[in-house]
Amino acid sequence: MPNQMRTTAPPDEKPLGSRAPRFVRRSRTLRLGWRAGVFVVGLAVVVSGVILLPLPGPGWLVIFAGMAIWATEFAWAQLVLRWTKRKVAEAARRAMDPRVRRRNIALTTAGAAICAALVSAYLWTYGLAVPWGIDH
């Protein structure tokens, strides 16, 4: 299998390289077509995710789905996904640290108290009227 990048991976990770069916990997023409198709489909999904970022919706999730599509064929995408998984696991582990959880709860409580005070001050001053004056 020329041009196939295979390296040793930890026991819990698959080796890097193409996940294409065997009959596709045997033919150079099929392999190039397959890679081009995977690239185009992954690109469409990633671009859709980028478009969704400023809109309400799962933009990052769609981007990672596109990366997962690319990772079925390209070693660089597999490495990016492995790095991302490690960082997410590390962040989750840090978030579960009792000191960090207490700090996060304290900051959330303080933020909620500040928001409640601001809403109360607004309602005390203006009542339920909106400042941009929508009248019937």
Image (tube, rainbow, N blue to C red):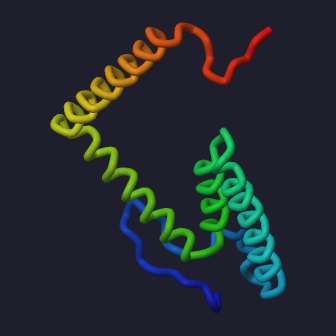
Q: Is residue 121 left or right of residue 57?
A: left
Q: Position of residue 110 (x, y in %)?
A: 28, 26
User: In the displayed structure, would residue 45 be above or below residue 77?
Assistant: above
In the rendered view, would you say 53 is above or below 38?
A: above
Quadrant where the C terminus is found in the figure = top right
Q: Is residue 35 above or below residue 64?
A: below
- Given residues 68 and 110, the one toward you in this image is 110
Name which residue lies at 45% across and 64% down. Answer: 82
Of residues 110 and 105, the one nearer the viewer is 110
Relative to the observer, which residue lies in front, 95 or 52? 52
Q: How many marks?
A: 0
Q: Is residue 18 left or right of residue 7?
A: right
Residue 46: x and y in percent read 68, 60
Question: Where, quadrant-wise, is the N terminus in this rendering?
Answer: bottom right
Where residue 49 sits, quadrant-wise, is bottom right
The residue shown at (64%, 50%) is: 53
Q: Residue at x 41, y 72 (%)?
A: 9
Q: Residue at x 46, y 80 (%)?
A: 7
- Please state which of residues 4 and 133 is positioned toward the viewer in this rendering: 133
